[in-house]
Amino acid sequence: MVKFMHRNMALLLATVMTALAITVYNMISLLVRHHHTALHDIRHAVFVIVLFGIFYGVVRYIQALPEDAD
């Protein structure tokens, strides 16, 4: 049973992520349609997530650099 689940985890994960993406898209569409100022807040949230990703990437890059041996 564990091997079966392990082999098919990608299929299950793809299905769940697709359903989640459709749900989030529909919720944002409804939110923007009924609350016009919400689009401004959504853009700020996306910017924050992108900025966090950039900072995370820079920090991981710095951590991956070899240390100087004195």
Image (spheres, rainbow, N blue to C red):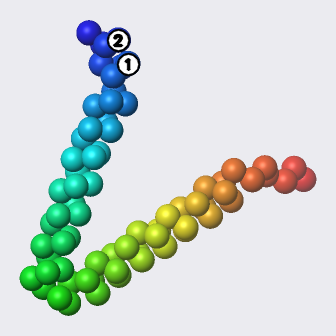
On the image, the x and y values in percent for residue 54 come to 55, 67
The reply, left or right, for residue 28 in relation to residue 60 is: left
Q: Amino acid at mark 2?
A: Lys
Q: Amino acid at mark 1?
A: Arg
* In front of the other: 56 or 13: 13
The residue at which mark 1 appears reads as 7
Q: Is 53 situated above or below 4?
A: below
- Looking at the image, which residue is at 21% across and 61% down? 24
The reply, left or right, for residue 68 in relation to residue 39 is: right
* In front of the other: 33 or 5: 33
On the image, the x and y values in percent for residue 53 come to 49, 64
- Looking at the image, which residue is at 37% across and 73% down? 46
Identify the image quadrant of residue 1: top left
The reply, left or right, for residue 70 in relation to residue 43 is: right
Q: Is 48 situated above or below 59?
A: below
On the image, the x and y values in percent for residue 30 come to 12, 73
On the image, the x and y values in percent for residue 68 come to 84, 53
Q: Is 36 situated above or below 2?
A: below
The reply, left or right, for residue 30 in relation to residue 66 is: left
Q: Secondary structure at mark 2?
A: helix
- Looking at the image, which residue is at 26% across and 38% down? 15
How crowded pointer 1 is (Cα within 10 Å; few <14, some 14-19, many 20+) is rated as few
Q: Are marks 2 and 1 in contact (CB under 8 Å)?
A: yes
Q: Hey, which residue is sitting farthest bottom in the picture?
A: 37
Q: How many marks?
A: 2
Residue 44 is labelled as: none
Residue 3 is labelled as: 2
- Looking at the image, which residue is at 28% across and 31% down? 12
Q: Hey, which residue is sitting farthest left in the picture?
A: 34
How crowded pointer 2 is (Cα within 10 Å; few <14, some 14-19, many 20+) is rated as few
Q: Secondary structure at mark 1?
A: helix
Label 2, label 1: how many angstroms apart (C-alpha)?
6 Å
